[in-house]
Amino acid sequence: GLGIYKTKKILSYEGWWEHDKQNGFGIEKWPRNTWFKGTYLEGSKDGIGILNIEDKGTYEGEMKNGNINGIGKFTFRDGRKYEGEFKNNKMEGYGILNWPDGKLFIGLIMLFIHLLHLHHLKGKMINHHF
C-alpha cells in the first residue's frame, strides 16, 4: 500500500510498498536537492524515472536494479545534454552529446557521470573538428 518512510535529516521516501519494500511509483529525497521520482521493483529503482543530482544535473529515463541503465537523457548543470545509452550509471554506448555553444557529438561514447570526464569517444563531431 501507500506509505511514507523518513530518517532524521537524511532520507525520505513516499510511495507504494509491497512486502516492506518500495514497489511501484515513489519519490525518494536526499539532502542538497537530490531526489528520484519514478518506479521501484522490490526495493530498487526499476523502470522509468527522473533522478536529480544537485551538483551534477538531471537524468530522465530507464533504471534497472537501482542503477541508470537503458535509454535516457542527462542534462548537465553547465547546459550540456546527452541523449542515448547508459550502462551501470555511465553514459556508455551510442548517443548524442550537445554543448551549449553549438558543438554536437554523435556516436559511441563512454562518460562517467560522477567524474564528468570524457574517456572514450568514437564518432563524428559536427560544427567543430574532432
Image (spheres, rainbow, N blue to C red):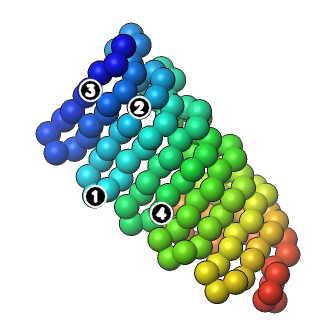
Q: Which residue lies at the image location 62% right of the left edge and 41% below the top edge?
A: 62
Real-space CA distance between mark 4 and mark 1, rounded to the nearest whole angstrom:
12 Å
- The residue positioned 57% from the left and 45% from the top of the image is 68
Disc 1, SS: loop
Mark 1 vs mark 2, CA separation in Å: 19 Å
Pointer 1 local density, CA inside 10 Å: few below 14, some 14–19, many at least 20: few
The circle drawn on residue 4 is 3
Residue at mark 1: 32
Mark 4 secondary-structure assignment: strand
Q: Which residue is mark 2?
A: 26
* Disc sitting over residue 57 in the figure: 4
**Element on which disc 2 rests:** strand
Position of 3 with respect to 49 (left or right) is left
Mark 1 or 3 closer to N-term? 3
Is residue 66 left or right of 94 when viewed as pictured?
A: left
Instruction: Specify which label sits upstream in the sequence, 3 or 2.
Output: 3
Q: Which mark is residue 24?
A: none
Residue 97 sits in quarter: bottom right
